[in-house]
Amino acid sequence: MALPRPRGDTSFSLASSREHPAVSSVSTTKLLPEAKNLQKSKIFQHRKTPLLHFSVGGRFSSWPAYASAQAILQTRKPCSTTDTTGAKDKAAHMIAKPRYLQQLENYLRKELLLLDMTKVNAQELKLQPYREIFEFFIEDFKTYKPLLSSIKNEYEITLAHFREKIRSLEPLKAMLVNISEECNEKILAIRAEERYEIKMLKKEKINLLKLIDKKNEEKISLQTQVAKLRKNLAEEYLHFLNERDARRILIADLNELRYQREDMSLAQSPGVGGEDPVKLTLALKMARQDLTKTQMELNTMKANFGDVVPRRDFEMEEKKNKALFEMMENLKSDFQEIRKEYDLLLQVHSAIVKDRDEFHNELQEIQRTSTPRPNWSKCEAVISGGRERWQLLSQGKSSDQLVDVLLEEIGSSLLLERETFQGLGFSEDVPVFLQTGGVVRNKKPSKKEVVDIVKDIWKERIAQDQKERLSPLSVFFLNYLKKRFGEASAMDWSYSIFENIKLFHSIEVMKQFYDVLTGKLDENVFHDQKSLVLHLMKELISTDIQNEGSLTTDQFSQALRNAFPLKTDEQIKELMDVAMTQLEEGNSLDFIHYRLLFSEDEMGNSGLFIQKLWDQAQNEKQAYLVELKTELESNKTAEITPGMLRQALINIDPTMDEYTLDSYMSQAFRTSIAGLEPEYAKKLEILLEHLQTAAIKRIGPREAEISS
């Protein structure tokens, strides 16, 4: 399409005008984007732009400010037909567009219709006609060519910058895909392990149910045997009772026959006739009376002892009964044990089911939020310093720590690019060292400078504590900056240092100062850590009589026990192992150079031994709080009064002195000991949260250890 030169209107005219040859193939044939762009560039090279001359008024036309809105390009459809109805009436109320503008709009419309908008880079292709129109404007209007060219260059530079930024983010997209795949594999492995554990638990449950059924069958069998033995015992008892009665009747018959025979023998004996009949009659009468008396006694004995069995049978039956009773008691105890085991298994099963549900929910949450384990070697190309520096930063660190390192590297680069910070204002929730309005400058201190400033702040703070602590650390921090850098620059340094300590959590000095400054930890926690290390150092120096800087392993172990008498043998062994690991290079097997254990790097980070010592102190604090929580929960009340807390502390730590007890009470209720009223109460969770941030520890051994 031939683009015309600007025609003269009410404001300006052209000195000369040349028209380009028409390019019919551009408007009628759908070319490839590369061929079309090449053809357009050739057209642009062959055009000759005439010079523009201002009219007598010296201004451009202000169209379409006073023209009808119907003449604007946006309200016209490229494919719509022209309505000729009433054209003469409308011409009287409309002012036509400049011819050059109409031709540019027609050219743009046709070029847009030729584009294929289904391609990936459709937006860039669509931008090309607009870029050409803008170039035509630049070439045609010589007076504004420098300004328009600079505007076009700035937009091109900005577009190139964003393209480069998008290209740099593409590796991160690939890294996210890899992380997602690794996480899915891990989740599948967890599911397989869970299915295997559930299968084993089901098998164990089936075996236990079979065992219970077997025991029940044995119990029923034994009960049947006991019933059968009781029935046999009753039959034997009746049999022996009948035998006893028959024997007694037989004895009575034998005695009667014997008496009759004796009477007959007396009557037939030759010497009887010579005796006195009266005497014999009297003797017979007396014998019959004795017989009657004996018969009465016998009947009495029968009535009283008729149901009595012989001792031998009684003892035998008693022995059998005792054996059966013992067997029944054993079965009862076995049954009770089996029932307890069954109840325990039910509880375990319910707990396992509950844990399984929790793990399943956690697994679903992990599936929804977690990502696979990343390939950290990809960070070598992003981190400044390359592979060697990344290996130095990532050595011996977990994935969570590596994320912190990566965030610190990215955050440090972004922090260096910032020139200013926006002030947070003067509201009450803003710390005093950040209360300012407007914009503050970024001083851009290095990490070493921030560490040195923080160390100097702690040094002066400790010196102030020895006299009297008059202000919190936040106020002292601001006063220190004003004293060192002046009133004008104090707030700039405050924001710069705070942003650095908030970012670098891998540096121990910065992290401790940030936690204390923001109230996550009490200031006494920091001082207790330092006093803990100082106490151990003094004990080791006192043990080192020769002052050679080294101790034997036995002396070092004994010094640890003397410095920390409440530590267990396992904790002492952990400290010994960490010390040997830290001093592995250049350390003999018999001597430990203990002074090297207290060395720090240039950033103030302590070695493995000091870190382990602080970790043990933190674990002991958590165990102490758990024991305190258990003691307080025994009161079965929602709120805890000062008296309850005091009694609980005395119960779990009986050797605690009164001053330490008052200190713990004040830290728990966040008030002075004089302001604590007996009826003042707080929830247990709030008290434990306050003690979590405070500096507390066990003062003496437990009650059982004291008695031993």
Image (cartoon, rainbow, N blue to C red):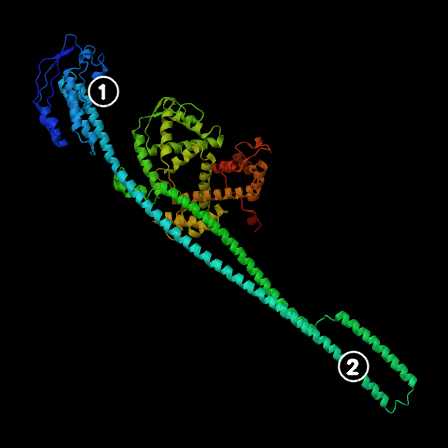
Judge left or right: residue 560 versus residue 488.
right
Q: Which residue is mark 2?
A: 255
Query: What crowding class fits label 2: few (fewer than 14 Cα within 10 Å), some (14-19), or many (20 or more)?
Result: few
The x, y position of residue 647, in whole percent, is: 58, 40
Q: Amino acid at mark 2?
A: Asn
The N terminus is located in which quarter?
top left
Q: Secondary structure at mark 1?
A: helix
For the point 71% across and 75% down, the residue is: 244
| Mark identifier at residue 687 | none
Q: Is residue 100 above or below residue 379?
A: above
Q: N-terminal of the two: label 2 or label 1?
A: 1
Q: Is residue 227 above or below residue 73?
A: below
The x, y position of residue 99, in whole percent, is: 14, 16
Q: Nearer the viewer, mark 2 or mark 1?
A: 1
For the point 48% across and 60% down, the residue is: 210
Q: Secondary structure at mark 2?
A: helix
Residue at the far bottom in the pictured view: 270
Q: In front: 314, or 487?
A: 314
Judge left or right: residue 82 versus residue 407.
left
The x, y position of residue 696, in whole percent, is: 50, 39
The x, y position of residue 538, in whole percent, is: 46, 43
Judge left or right: residue 34 versus residue 214.
left
Q: Which residue is mark 1?
A: 75
Mark-to-mark CA distance, 2 and 1: 151 Å
For the point 28% across and 41% down, the residue is: 175
**Does residue 343 show up?**
yes
Q: In front: 372, or 346?
A: 346
Q: Amino acid at mark 1?
A: Thr
Q: In front: 171, or 328?
A: 328
